[in-house]
Image (spheres, grey):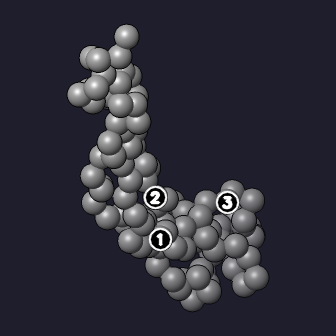
Amino acid sequence: GSCRHRCCLGRNNACWVSGARQAHCYCDSYCETTGDCCEDYRATCRHAAVGCAVGPWGPWSGCSSPCGVGSKARSRQVTVPPQHGGEPCPDLKQRRGCLGEHPTCGMAK
C-alpha cells in the first residue's frame, strides 16, 4: 500500500489502502494511535500534529444592563492554531450573568 496522494490529516476511516497480507493500512494521523499506518505514512506525512494553544482569559466586560439582569463576556486569543490533525481549539469566549447596579437605578420610577 501507499499513502502517496492520499489524506494524511485528522481521522478518516475512508482513507486506507491494502497493505501487507491484504490487511488495510490507514493514511491519516489517527493511524499512529491505532498502529495501523501504511509503511510510507511517516515519510509522506512527516509533519507532527500540533494542538491548539490559547492565551489567558481577558478581563470580564461590564454588565450589559446598567439596571437589572444582564450579562458579562470575556475572551481569549489563539496563540498557536491547530495543524496537521492536532487538537482543536477550546472555547474562546465565555459569558455569565450579572446584575447591573448603576447608582441611578434606584431613582427610576
State the residue in front, 27 or 104: 104
Residue at the image point whose x is 32% and y is 42% from the top: 62
Structural crowding at the residue carrying mark 2, measured as other residues with C-alpha within 10 Å and reported as few (<14), some (14–19) or many (≥20): some
**Residue 79 point in image, percent of width and height:** 38, 71
Image depth: mark 3 or mark 2 in front: 2
Q: Which residue is mark 3?
A: 12
Please, what secondary structure does the residue beneath circle 2 have? loop
Q: Which residue is mark 2?
A: 89
Q: Which mark is residue 81?
A: 1
Structural crowding at the residue carrying mark 3, measured as other residues with C-alpha within 10 Å and reported as few (<14), some (14–19) or many (≥20): some
Query: Residue 7, relative to residue 14: is it above or below?
Result: below
**Residue 47 point in image, percent of width and height:** 51, 83
Estimate the spatial distance between the alpha carbons at disc 3 and disc 1, rounded to whole Å. Answer: 21 Å
Disc 3 + disc 1, Cβ < 8 Å: no
Amino acid type, mark 2: Cys
Amino acid type, mark 3: Asn
Locate the N terminus by quadrant: bottom right
Q: Quadrant of residue 58?
A: bottom left
Of mark 3 and mark 2, the one earlier in the sequence is 3
Q: Is residue 73 left or right of residue 40?
A: left
Of mark 3 and mark 1, the one earlier in the sequence is 3
Evaluate whether residue 90 shows in this view: no
Evaluate whether residue 102 shows in this view: yes
Disc 2 + disc 1, Cβ < 8 Å: yes
Estimate the spatial distance between the alpha carbons at disc 2 and disc 1, rounded to whole Å. Answer: 7 Å
Residue at the image point whose x is 75% and y is 70% from the top: 18
Q: Is residue 78 left or right of residue 26?
A: left
Residue at the image point whose x is 40% and y is 64% from the top: 77
Residue at the image point whose x is 55% and y is 63% from the top: 30
Of mark 2 and mark 1, the one earlier in the sequence is 1
State the residue in front, 82 or 47: 82
